[in-house]
Structure formats: structure tokens, C-alpha cells
Image (cartoon, coloured by chain):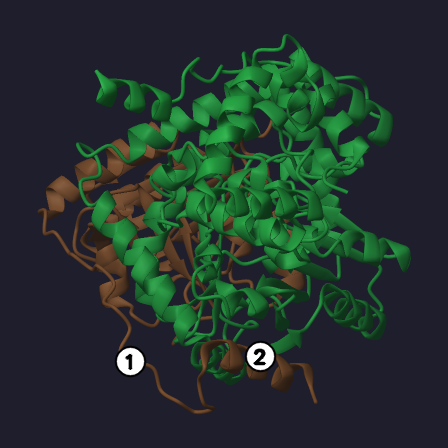
Amino acid sequence: MTAREEILGRVRQALGREPGQTPAPAPEARIRVSSIGLDARLDLFQTRLEALGGKVHRAVTLIEARDQVARLIGDSAAVASNAGLLRRAGITALPGVGSGFLEEPALREACTTASFGVTSADYGLAEMGSLVTFASSEARLISLLPPAHIAVLAKATLLTGLDELYERHPLPAEGSSSMVLITGPSRSADIEMILVRGVHGPGVVHVIVVEEDI
Amino acid sequence: MWIKPAQEQGIRKTVADRKVQLAVYSATARLKEKRAEAVSPDVFPEYEELRSQANRIKQHALENLDHYLEQFEKNVESHGGRVIWAREGAEVADFILGLANERGVSLLVKSKSMTTEEIHLNERLEHHQLEAVETDLGEYIVQLAHERPYHIVAPAVHKTRQDIADILERRLHVPREEEPEKQAMIARRTLREKFLAAGIGISGANFLVADSGAVVLVENEGNVRLCTTAPRVHVAVAGLEKILPRAQDLAVFLKLLARSGTGQLLTVYTSFLSGPRRRGEVDGPEEFYVVLLDAGRTRLLADKEKRQSLFCIRCGACLNACPVYRKIGGHNYPGAYSGPIGAIITPQYQGLARDPWLPYASSLCGACAEVCPVKIDIPRILLELRKQITESRTGGLERMAFRLYGWLMRRPKLYALAGRMAGKLARIPGLAKLGPGAAWASQREIPLPAGRSFRDEWRERKKS
């Protein structure tokens, strides 16, 4: 007997169930979407993220967002993702910004030397100050390897919280191999409960919220 | 044997160690306080409702576990991943060894996983000359010190910065550094190289989502994301009880886990991983495996009363709340899991005979049940386990004493005589401190029976 058959057999025996027996419907998960207005969501998002040591910048237009990115990265090297939003804003064309990586080795190489990783985000979650990124739209290493992360987020994609996210995406695996929630800079309190930022992931997180419809 | 002399010695040593006492006491106090703030009704009014719901969802998932395991497997496979079934810990190691061998991998990176601690995976891999590096900062420190984690969410909670300075200096041959921030940066630099060179990344799983075939991992440092992204192969090792039916259930569990564990609204990173990189994705692992471990869990599943032990989401809140854990620390609990949750799951996974004292390592104050986000009735399970242990261990002498007592109770005259005699005997100085009651009496005053028995008193009253 294979381990699979043996374990499933033990489980069924323990529960008194037959193979193929369907369960009663699962108890409902509490999904309660409160609807606070978009402006309030942005304010809350900013409060929460900044309480964690992140920084929120507001830009009216994509051009303004690009200029803010340029100011933040200065003369440093940066890697930008292939997100359409960054291209449209002209961020991928900024001097010092490497972009357009389609193969992992080259992307990895660029990310290990860059000071900034620039990405978009699929959503922001106001209640926690979180960014939501799906692997289908964002490479994972750009928001992970460089010491600082800059995310450009359309204001209209700000959701209230987890409930709204899972209501919109009841099956997050359908279009993407990963969905990552990023809530502030990397941190650890493993040494004497003292807060240290940037332990493995970026210790600096900037979010530029673009207010115009994009 | 009840408690091994070495175990008792270990406890005495910890209790006498003022440095460790202070470190553990203050860290757990801080975590306790942060949790209490995060779940207080004014900031989190839905807390109690979510607890009940989490409890119901876990109960449902376990009652239909075979169904959800099969659904999980089907969905993992539909996204190009594979599920491996392991009856015992050794089978997990065998699988990973085989994989490393086939792929020519000698360096593996690991993110924190209590399950792999439970099955001693690192030792098994090292035995075969593989290097398996822990990457969570606290876990890395205890690995360098050749110790095991002290706390479910804070593995190095018992170490001071000076201890850590010693460890880093000795093991990594770096200049001595006592600032936590600089110590963390030493770890960051050293581990960054490992992440980029490792061929396999091993993670645990906080949740397995049946309707998505996904592994969910929460963390604050980014080491889990690196372990599951940078190496070409990702292997998640999980107890089969980690199943949730739907991704939507995470809206309940993620809120409870972070608040209960560290008082955060959400951990810094929450990864929902459902297989190898897909077409059009630039990075992510090319191979994705989930190892489902039994190792005693199905035996526990069969016990309706104690099945709820498997609801645990490893937040660590019960450790911080427990007066016994805070005093005796994490290393005196045998097995990977410490604190109240360890006192109930370790004996159930490994069998009651090995460390029968464990369910007694509790004052039954109930603080653990009060803070448990999934409402496991830990004190009740402790009592159940004590009952089982007592039933299996009660010796001949105790049984004979009760038999004698029963015999006496059925003979009123003899019983009255025995009562009078006991009253007199108990008054002989020092006698009560002999025999089986000696240990008990060494710290306490023996209550004396009344000079006259109730029967005597009653008889006299009736006369007058």
C-alpha cells in the first residue's frame, strides 16, 4: 500500500467516512465588506503604513509619480518591473533604471546590485497599509532583493481590507502562482525584542499613490 | 519513570538562571501586552465572532479531512506541483534527500517550520552531508548555537545580545558586535549568499488551502519569500491538519494569527503560493512540492474529544500566557513544541508513555484557553490526558487502599472504630510525616481530624 492510500485510509477510519463521501457545506467565512470612501481609504492606508515605518507619497498624475521616483532613487541603480503602469509613467525609461527583464538570471543579477526595486501593486489594503502583488503582474524578486522598495499604486485600487480582497479574488491561484501581501518594511524583533528593519527584505518601503484615473 | 532526573535538573537550572528568567519573562510580557491591545473590543470588535468562526471552520475541515486533502492534492497537481505523503518524519527526509541527490543539490535554505523541528529534519539532512541553513534570524541564531527554538514565534527569546555576539563571533568568525541592528545585518549578509546559492528552499506552511492547492506562509523578515522564490525548487513540509477548505477562510485566520502572535494587524509578508512559476512569470521556483505529514496526527484525529488539539495555528499566545512556560522556559519541554500546546500535542504525537509528566506541567489556571484564537480547550485536554495516564499507571498499593476503604465503608461499626482510631493516631506527633504522605506533609500542616467524631456528637445531642 502506498503512503497516500495508507494515510487517507487512516483518516477515513478515524472519521468513519467512506471514500468519495462529500462533506456538508463548510461554515461561512466571515466576509464583511465595509464601504468607507476612497479618500478615507487613502488616509487610512497612509496612517497604517507610516506607523510601520513606510512612507506614502501622493501624486496627481503619472508624470508626477515618475518625478517622485526619480527624486527617490537619485543617482542610485534601480530595477523596475515590466508592469504597464511603470512603462506608461515613463519610469522604466528613467536613467539608472534597469527594466524589461524576461529571464530570471538577468533579473536576479540586476536585483542583487540595485539599491531600489520599483514595482506596481495590484491593490492596496487600507486597514493594514498592505500592498497586494500577483506574480502574473510582478516579478517577485524586485520587491524583495534590493534594500529599498518603491511601489506605484493607483488610488482607485485601494480596497478596505482582507475581506474585500478575498471577495474579489475567492480563488487567488487561478491566474497566478503567487499572491504576496506586503505590509511595511521587512522587520525582526528576534534579538531582545528590539525592532530591526530590513533583515532580509527591503528595510525601506515607499508607496506612490497616483490619484488620477489610470 | 515519571520525570527523568536530567529533565528535572534542567527545570531547576532554568528556574535558578536569573538572566534567562528575565529575558523570557519580559519578552512574553511584551507579547502578551501587544496581543491584548490588538484584540481589545474597541479596536477589534469582531474578535470573539472570528474566534468562534475559526473554531467551526477548523472543526469542519478536520471532520472532512480526507475530502479536503484529496481536493488539495488535485489542485496542487493542476498547477504543476506535486504532493508527497509521509507516514513518518523519516519519509520526509528520504524524499528531500532523494530530490537533492537527483538535482545535485548540497545546500538548502530553510524558513522557520515547527513541523521540520518535530521530525528533526536538519539532523537527518546533515547526517547525509547536506547543508540545511535556517534563515529566520532567531532560528539562525539557535542553529548556530546548536540549540532548538525556545518559543514558537520567538526562537531566540532566551538569548541576550551578548550571548548572540558570542555566537556570531565564534561561529562566523566576524568581529564582535553587540548592537542588535548590526548583528541582524551580519546575518543578512551571510544568509543572502546562501539564498542565492541554494538549490532547494524548504518552508513549513501556516495553512494549506484546499480549493486553491495553495500553501500560505506568514512572516516579518522576508526570509520565507526568499526561500520560496530564489532556489529552483520549493518544498513545503506541513502536518496534514493544516488544511483550510477555502481561500476565503484566510480572511478569518490571518487576522487572528497576527494579532494573537505578535499583536500586529498583519505580518509584513503573507505569501499565497500555488505552484511553480507559470508561463509569463519571470521568477519563482521551477518545481513545487508539498509534503503532507501524518506522524501521529491521524491517531489523534480518531479521538473526538481531543481532536481539537489539531486546530492549533501556532501563534504562541498560550506560551506567553502560561505561568509554567514563563518559569521553566521552552527547552524543558521535550519535543519541538513548548508551553501549553506542547503539553497536549507532544504526548499525543509521541504516545503517553514517554513523558507522562507533561500534562501535569500546568496549574490548570485556564489562561491558555482564554487567549487561544481558535478556542482549543487546553485545560480540559490536559485533564483528559491526566485521566488516561492515571488509569494506565495506578499502582497496586493505591488500588488496594481504595479497595480497603470500600470494604470499610460497607461496615458501619468497623468504620466508626477506624475513624476514632485515626483521630487518635493523627495526634501522635510526627507520625503523619512518615509513610506515603511524607512528601506532601513536608511543606504543609496536616489538618487534624476533630477530637470527637460527628457520630459521637450526634449521639450525645440526642441524649440531652
Against B56, is B317 above or below?
A: above
Name the mark on residue A10.
2
- Judging depth in this view, the residue of B301 and B320 nearest the camera is B301
Tell me where residue A209 appears, x and y as whole percent. 26, 44
The number of numbered badges drawn on the structure is 2
Please provide percent x and percent y for residue B419: 49, 27
Q: What quarter of the picture does the C terminus of chain B occupy?
A: top left
Q: CA distance from mark 2 to mark 1?
A: 21 Å
Residue A24 bears which disc, if any?
A: 1
The answer to whether residue B398 is left or right of residue A162 is: right
Find residue B354 and report its horizontal and vertical position in percent: 72, 50
Helix, strand or loop at mark 2: helix
Q: Residues within 10 Å of mark 2 (few under 14, many from 20)?
A: some
Residue at left 47%, top 44%? B411
Image quadrant occupied by the N terminus of chain B: top right
The answer to whether A167 appears left or right of B144 in the picture is left
Can you say whether B162 is above or below B82 in the image? Answer: above
The residue shown at (52%, 42%) is B408
- Foreground: disc 2 or disc 1: 2
Whether residue A97 can be seen here: no
Image coordinates of residue B295 in percent, x first then y, are 66, 65
The answer to whether residue B135 shows anywhere in this view is yes
Neighbor class of circle 1 (other Cα within 10 Å; few <14, some 14-19, many 20+) is few
Residue at image point 52% right, 40% down: B340
Chain B hue?
A: green
Locate residue A183: give its quadrant.
top left
- The answer to whether B264 appears left or right of B408 in the picture is left
Residue B358 is marked as none
The vertical placement of A40 against B158, above or below, is: below
Identify by letter the chain in brown.
Answer: A
